[in-house]
Image (cartoon, rainbow, N blue to C red):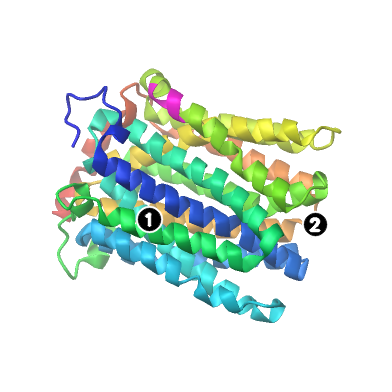
Amino acid sequence: MTGPGEGARHPLREAPFARLWVSGLLTETGRWVLQLALPLYVLALTRSPLVTSVVAMLGLLPSLVVAPLAGALVDRFDRRRFLIVVSLAQAAALTPLLWVEDAGDLWRVYLVAGAEAVLTMAFESVKNVALPAFVAPGQLVSANAAIGLNASLGRLVGSSLGGLLLGWAGLRLVLGSAMAAFLVAAVLAATIPRATGAHEPGGAGRGELWPGLRDALRAIREVPALRGTFQCVALLSLAQGMFVVLFLLFVTDLLGAGEAEAGLLRGVQAVGGFAGTVTVGVVTRRLGAPRLLSVGVLCFGAVSAVTWNLSQAPLGLTVYAALFALAGVPAVWLMAAWLSLVQQSSPPRVRGRVMACVLGLADGLQAVGMLAAGLLTGVMSPLAALDLQAALLLAAGLLTLRTLPAGRSGATAGAPADAKAAGPVRRAAD
């Protein structure tokens, strides 16, 4: 494991973290294969944006309900074994989709989307909570940026593959590729040594689920960095939920393109993700994690607004591909910043529950955003709805700029104030 004095050593040079990273990359790839292909499949089956948004929404709401339980499990059990079981379950949960033939089988899609959302949230919770045990504190933002990069790479490979496979061979080949990704992720998780942070339960005793959840919610309320990050993630998630549905209309209605082009635009953001990962260390040293979050969200919102409104000009697909790639830079910055703030500002004994609460909130508000997008398309143009989505991103950046304490110390910016505020929470948790 990286020690405190090894700040120059890149986290990916540590074998346990590298295995966690690759396992996460495969899971992200499988998730993005499904996240692009399933809504497109449902849209083609029903020709209804509202039904498409409901399918996507039902894929997120269950995780909001299950988040407290998942957080408690993350705090209590062997995290390495947890990763293996969840990855295997993700592969097995896809099997009902093999019997989907027409709109009468949509209930199978609802069921699988909900199960995959719960399992994805559980995987993300344990991966993000275990991460600080793999790297030195000063490298936490860089490690989270690497995690953000594998999310971008998963998007690049998974969404491109999902669009191409769906258009070329149909749903069954899409399912086969996602299953394979989840199974290999389970094998890799099994190679993580038990002596690392993958087996680092938080120590919560059995029967402490609800008291532990109360302590996690109290920490979010009382710790300034957690409270500000929580508010920012809420607005980001609402905007992201709208994007999931509106993006399909952006491609099909405003650009006049199809499945392959949709996969390309969703995937090319990974190109910018590389640049974001390379630059995040320098930018964090200059700004600190709180300001990195603000700047990342504001830049992301600005690029989104420009992209949506350029659709009114007769431009080629290359221009939009370049803009989506550019958006990948602040996307990695903001993800690395908010994950680092949550990881380092959370009381250790309830860190899993805090992370699960944040991820559960994100999924719940993404579902609200998806439903809102489906409803908005009935009363306003796709471009107006997309402009509203960009406005939410800009509002999130301005709110974060105002509420989070500034600092240049990376992920620990504002730590003295946070530690003071978290004192009663830590005592209650202990």
Q: Earlier in the sequence, mark 1 or mark 2?
A: 1
Q: Report the predominant secondary structure element of the magenta stretch.
A: helix
How many angstroms separate mark 1 from mark 2 (CA)? Answer: 43 Å
**Residue 402 x, y percent position in the rendering:** 47, 31
Q: Is residue 94 left or right of residue 239?
A: left
Q: Nearer the viewer, residue 266 or 332?
A: 266
Q: Amino acid at mark 1?
A: Ala
Question: Which mark, residue 379?
Answer: 2
Question: Which part of the image, by quadrant, shows the N terminus?
Answer: top left
**Residue 368 x, y percent position in the rendering:** 58, 59
Q: Nearer the viewer, residue 193 or 342?
A: 193
Magenta range? 277-281
Q: What residue is shown at x 80% (from left), y 44% (from top)?
A: 255
In reply to whether residue 8 is colored magenta, the answer given is no
- Tell me the element at label 2: loop
Question: Which mark, residue 185?
Answer: 1
- Tell me the element at label 1: helix
In the picture as drawn, the residue positioned furthest to the bottom comes out as 104
**Residue 204 x, y percent position in the rendering:** 17, 60
In reply to whether residue 278 is colored magenta, the answer given is yes
Q: Amino acid at mark 2?
A: Val
**Residue 23 x, y percent position in the rendering:** 37, 50
In the picture, residue 301 is in which quadrant? top right
Bin the neighbour count of mark 1 within 10 Å (Cα to Cα): few under 14, some 14-19, many 20 and up. many
Note whether residue 107 is visible.
yes
Q: Is residue 310 left or right of residue 68?
A: right
Note whether residue 297 is visible.
no
Q: Is residue 25 left or right of residue 374?
A: left
Q: What residue is shown at x 45% (from left), y 57% (from top)?
A: 181
Q: Is residue 52 left or right of residue 109?
A: right
